[in-house]
Image: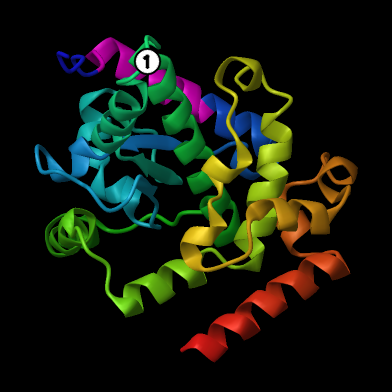
Amino acid sequence: MKTPAGPSIEALEELRTDCESLCRQCALIDFDGKPLYVVLGSEIVGDENVERIGGCTTSLLDVLARPSIESRGQWCGRGPALMINEKMMWQIAVEQCGTTSLPVFPKFKSLCLSVALHEAAHLAVDGTARQDISPEAAEYVSTKTLRAFRVALTETTATREERRSDREHHDAKWIRAILHLHHRACATNYWPLLAMQLDVVADLELYGLSPVWKFERAIGDEPARLIGLSIAEILASEPPGEFSKLYTADTDRLKGLQ
């Protein structure tokens, strides 16, 4: 069977728009008044394969991707940014649709939207404010930091320390944030079309934690009750007791395995 050609430039631009729209609808207050940049992995690493991660974010991602953003005429100053590994997502979509008659692009779009929501939770946890930096600092970031960033993205194996770091970046705050964002995503126009399953958006078992459905049950009706608040406001409050109890039990168990 012939491998389907990758998405067109026009389709990728539409994908950017949809990913930004989804994130803004789910975290309206958090991203209000700020640019939100959706960056493709190929804009960071070129033609190199990125096989380890489906997406990422960093406080300097907008600076790293600024040349590409400016080339599209979309630079509006510093702002939160998320990266989607579109080549990896396309390959996964091709593999999952290969034994069926299903078209690849809808599956690809669903996967990318799931990654965008996952990374939006990181942005909400870490904060969306960005400070201006000097041209000299920007140049430093674009050389030294970009080189290290490219190495991290193209590394195909994860060390034990890196896996621990991945788990620490998906802590109780992130889990709580993604549960709220996922709840809100269910009410958007993207949900019926793309059916983003929670265990795709937040596969906590990758980090040695309990399945995400257990955390969804433990958090109860909080996402519905606090739907009018920003994610930042929610994270500043105490989480439900059962949610904290489950996370603590997980972390205690993992400490015993070290």
Q: Quadrant of residue 104?
A: top left
In reply to whether residue 78 is colored magenta, the answer given is no
Membership of 12 in magenta stretch: yes
Number of numbered tags placed on the structure image:
1
Q: Residue 218's x, y, as percent?
A: 81, 59
Image quarter in which the N terminus is found: top left
Q: Is the magenta stretch mostly helix, strand or loop?
A: helix
Residue 45, image x and y in percent?
Answer: 15, 45
> At 63% from the left edge and 57% from the top edge, which residue is drawn?
211
Residue drawn 22% across and 64% down? 157
Q: Which residue is denoted by mark 1 in the rendering?
A: 100
Q: Which element type, helix, strand or loop, lies under badge 1?
A: loop
Task: List the single residue furthest toward the front.
Answer: 99
- State left or right for residue 17 relative to residue 183: left
Please give the name of the residue rendered at 35% of the width and 21% of the height, measured from the top-left corner.
97
Taking 184 as reference, is 208 left or right? Answer: left
224 is higher (above) or lower (below) than 94 = below
- In the image, residue 213 above or below residue 66: below
Color scheme of the displayed model? rainbow
Q: Give percent across and percent down for residue 213.
A: 70, 51
- Quick check: can you spot residue 238? no
Where residue 89 appears, as percent x and y from the top left, is 32, 33
- Residue 150 image-quadrant placement: bottom left
Amino acid type, residue under disc 1 in the picture: Thr
Q: Residue at x 68, y 22 (%)?
A: 188
Q: Give the range drawn in magenta.
A: 7-20
Indicate the quadrant where residue 142 lies.
Answer: bottom left
Looking at the image, residue 99 lies above or below residue 175 = above
Q: Name the foreground residue: 130 vs 205.
A: 205
In the rendered structure, the answer to whether residue 69 lies left or right of residue 189 reads: left
Q: Nearer the viewer, residue 209 or 55?
A: 209
Residue 182 seen: yes
